[in-house]
Structure formats: structure tokens, C-alpha cells
Image (cartoon, rainbow, N blue to C red):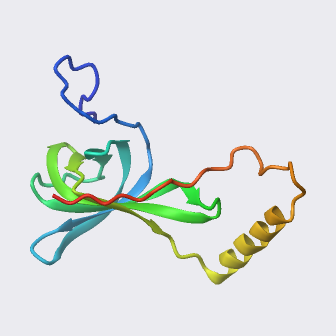
Amino acid sequence: MEIPVEGIVDDRRSSRRYDLKLPLRWKLMGLQRLLDTGTGISVNLASGGILFEAGAPLPRGIYVELSIAWPALLHNTVPLRLMVSGPIIRTSGTCAVMQVVQHEFRTIPQPAEQRAISASLLNRLLQRPAGKTARAGSRAAPSRLHQRAH
């Protein structure tokens, strides 16, 4: 299922969309209570909204919270999740578009064994002679965190 987003002559979107297929978890929120949960995958992301495949039809107008596995690592070792929330503004089948009202990055807690491996790896990297770099394909961490509320 695809909601057309490109090739529209009168497209007035002010923010760029990024085609990122990332695993996510969603929560539908009612008045101070959880209505439903599920998993899905992002289709594309922009600063103002996210198109995602929810795996089930979701109701328009309901507030949704997404927890998206982020592909970059903080300090090249710590996994991150992008947490976003806002209303569902459009749906088509099992696809939904949410307006981003709030967003923030959170670190993902690691098991003690994984923390020990990460610390060991970091120590080895810090002991490299000058001029040696980390292996190709290392991911850079996001430069800053933003939160926006309306």
C-alpha cells in the first residue's frame, strides 16, 4: 500500500522527506490510557510527519507514540531510539501518516555483558596509534537533540 508523496505539482511540504525503512513500535493513546499497541516499519520521515506501515488499520485523529530503532549509534557504541508522538492525520489501509508534535532521542539500555564488550572495544580504539581510524562504515552519532511541542 502506498500513499503518493512524490510528483505532486502543488506539493506544499516545507520539509524534506527521507526514505528510511526502520523497525518501530507504536502505541495508540486515549485520554490518559493505552488503547492499542503494535509493530511496524517506517516508510519515510520528515521533521513534520512520518509515514509508516502499522501492520493493521489505525484510526485517524488518534494520538500515536512511535519508538523507532535509529540506525546511528551514540559515540559509535550506544544504540538509540527516536521517540515521536502526535496525531494520526491520514490513513490508507494499514499505512498511517502522523504529525510530529514531539520528538527526542533516547539511549537503549544494554545488558551488562554488552556494556562490557562496548567498554572493551572503546578502550582498544582509544589505544590506537595516532593516524589510525575506526573501521570503514562506522556510523556517526546525531549532533543534537530537539524537542518541539505545539
Residue at the (26%, 58%) spot, across then down: 148
Q: Residue furthest bottom?
A: 112
Q: Nearer the viewer, residue 24 or 121?
A: 121
Quadrant position of the N terminus in the picture: top left
In the depicted structure, whether residue 123 falls above or below residue 138:
below
Side of 115 relative to 42 (left or right): right
Q: Residue at x 64, y 64 (%)?
A: 77
Q: Quadrant of residue 67?
A: bottom left
- Give residue 112's quadrant in the image: bottom right
Residue occupying the far right of the picture? 129
Residue lying furthest top in this view? 9
**Residue 66, percent across and down?**
31, 60
Please give left or right for residue 41 compared with residue 7 in the image. Answer: right
Q: Name the residue rendered at 31%, 60% in the picture.
A: 147
Q: Quadrant of the C terminus?
A: bottom left
Q: Residue furthest front?
A: 130
Residue 39 image offset from top left, x and y in percent: 35, 60
Q: Residue 68 placed where, x, y %?
A: 40, 58
Would you place residue 130 above or below residue 29 in this image?
A: above
x, y (%) of residue 146? 36, 58
- Residue 67 position (above or below residue 98): below
